Structure formats: structure tokens, C-alpha cells
Image: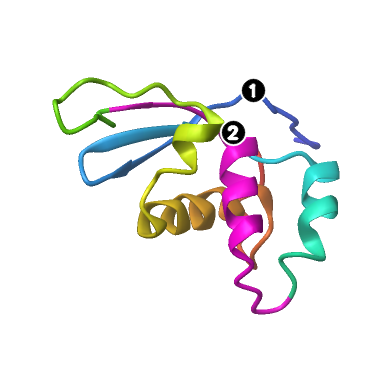
Amino acid sequence: MGIVIDPLRIHEKEIDGAVFRAVGLTGRQVLALSSQLGEGSTDNEAIYEVVQKSLKSWTAVTDPAGEEIPCTPDNIDLLPVTVAVALFEFIAGLSGLTGDEAGNS
């Protein structure tokens, strides 16, 4: 079959009723982040950086009044840590940042 490159493929992850849409990181982005994300690293900046680079949209993320909040870098920073970590783990699996062989295809 050969090598499949599909950098625009959107992958969805549901967390607590919200749906997050992300793309895998490029090889260049993975290499740039690899030193920050080395063995057992829990670099909080790197976690949010990965989510900001990969996350393209979301639904059912609202303010207390129930109004939809747009998916922007500033709003991504407001996500609860548990949600950001779950998204990071999802994106890492897509991008080969973990032992998973999920890749970007």
C-alpha cells in the first residue's frame, strides 16, 4: 500500500459530551517537541502547545450561560487540565509521540 500522508484528516475525541476535532502533528512538529516530551516528561507548556497546534474545532464547549465558546488558542488555555491532558494523549497517539503506532493515517 505504501505510505499514506493525510495531514488534513480530522480525528474526533468525545470528552464529557463535548466533541473535539484534531489533526495529527507533522513530523517536523513532533521532532521540535520531542525534547520537551522526552521520557516521562510532564511539561505543562508542551501539553497545551500540542493541543493548540492540533485542535481545529470543538462542539458543546460552553460558558456558564450555555453559550458556545469558540475554539481559539486563548480558550484552549482555559480548558480544564484533565481535558487538556486527555486531548494531549489522544493527539500524541495520532502523531507517534507515544509508543502507539496510530500514525497520521
Q: Quadrant of the N terminus?
A: top right
Colour scheme: rainbow
Write down the residue under mark 2: 23
**Crowd class of label 1 (few under 14; some 14 to 19; many from 20; radius 10 Å):** few
Write down the residue under mark 1: 8
Whether residue 25 can be seen here: yes
Where in the figure is residue 46, as x and y percent of width and height?
66, 57
For the record, the magenta segment spans 39-59
Residue sitting nearer the eye, 43 or 33: 43
To which quarter of the image does residue 18 belong? top left
Where in the figure is residue 41, as x and y percent of width and height?
66, 74
**Between discs 1 and 2, the one toward the N terminus:** 1
Tell me whether the residue at label 1 lies in contact with that at label 2, contact meaning CB atoms closer than 8 angstroms: yes
Q: Quadrant of the C terminus?
A: top right
Q: Residue at x 33, y 24 (%)?
A: 69
The answer to whether residue 56 is above or below residue 84 is above
Report if residue 48 lies within the magenta region.
yes
Q: Residue at x 39, y 45 (%)?
A: 79
Q: How far apart, in angstroms, are the residues tagged by discs 1 and 2?
A: 6 Å
